[in-house]
Image (tube, helix red, strand yellow):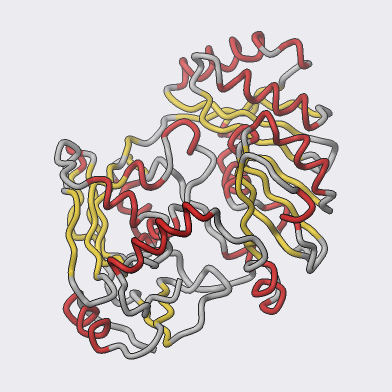
Amino acid sequence: MIRPGSEAELAEALRDATGPLSVRGGGTRGLLPDGTPLSTSALSGITLHDPAALTLVALAGTPVEEIDAALAKANQRLAFEPMDHRALLGTTGTPTIGGVVAANVSGPRRMQVGAARDHLLGLRFVDGEGTVVKNGGRVMKNVTGYDLARLVAGSRGALGVITEVALKVLPGTETAASLVIRGLDDATAVRAMSEALGTPFEVSGAAHDPQAQGGARTVLRIEGFAPSVEYRCRALAERLASHGAWEVETDREAVRVDWRGIRDVAPFHGTAGDVWRVSVRPSQAAELVARAGAEQAFYDWGGGLIWLRCAEGDDLRARLGRYDGHATLVRAAPETHAKLHTLQPEPLAVQALTRGLRETFDPRGILAA
């Protein structure tokens, strides 16, 4: 394994590479592309944290838990609450901030505050020719070249290897509470979540588990100062009374742990079968799940994100047909993943754009993503 200890060493390794490189951070994402392993784990450390400016800069291999701990001391947080994939994928390792940005990993709060890329002020990366590229800045008002940083976020290493990220952070929350209702069918639950997200009560999470223990469970999260949270919970419950009686659970009753489970798709932990991650318009979500015929489903982002657990080898894309969204195979046996992952090519326009970008940043094709 190639494990550079500095950005200069990484650039040299990329320039000298003669074949594909399989880039990884903390090794938590399961299946990785073929190629010589290249790890960014030695590029670690927080290089700047300015609480007053709500800004943090860290090297790509910095563990997310180290960043969370540093921010917590200043009563701050990564508002996009990135998912921890380990329990779902059955992997070990340590999630890193570079991996989070490279995959644009975003949790339940995404629909309120945006995705990981929306909190990215700038980054540094090394492209496929070994050239160091700096984009963006370290403070919020410096957004020169911001689009390139957003492009690299979510590219999964196909355009370059991230070495440093600058992020906007947000203050922590004083308290949190959840509104909970049981027994709603999927379509009704999605309507209730959409209605809640359309209110002025700043709902920061909306999830539905059709197969929860004790019956289908729909949960809405509200965060902030305690008096405000109490008022908004009461007002939202009244607004949604047509769907039934909502119970309120406060953070003293382990709601935060519950939302960590929602973030990490806890209902699928320890289960068998393939797992698909489907992005879709909420208005299509319930009908899509019915069409999928999956063994288990879980809704996040108010219905905009669906997790589906299917029998091993099921081609979910073929079963769903055409719809306004995208399905990604997240967990499967290696041979099944290789087979199903290639069955649905991207649209021609997207293929052309992707090819052009990769030819610009990785003309030799050494970044196996």
Looking at the image, which residue is at 37% across and 81% down? 38
Looking at the image, which residue is at 66% across and 23% down? 248
The answer to whether residue 313 is above or below residue 301 is below
The percent coordinates of residue 145 (x first, y second) are 19, 47
Looking at the image, which residue is at 70% across and 75% down? 333
Tell me, yes or no, if residue 65 can be seen here.
Answer: no
Given residues 227 and 189, the one toward you in this image is: 189
The percent coordinates of residue 296 (x first, y second) are 80, 50
Q: How many numbered marks appear?
A: 0
Quadrant of the snapshot with the N terminus: bottom left
The percent coordinates of residue 274 (x first, y second) are 74, 64
Looking at the image, which residue is at 34% across and 61% down? 357
Given residues 60 and 358, the one toward you in this image is: 358
The answer to whether residue 87 is above or below residue 302 is below
The answer to whether residue 304 is above or below residue 309 is above
Would residue 355 appear left or right of 43 to someone viewing this image?
Answer: right
The percent coordinates of residue 279 (x first, y second) are 60, 44
Given residues 52 and 294, the one toward you in this image is: 294
Given residues 70 and 279, the one toward you in this image is: 279
Would residue 188 appear left or right of 141 to someone viewing this image?
Answer: right
Splitting the image into 4 quarters, where does residue 108 fall? top right
Quadrant of the snapshot with the C terminus: bottom left
Tell me, yes or no, if residue 3 can be seen here.
Answer: yes
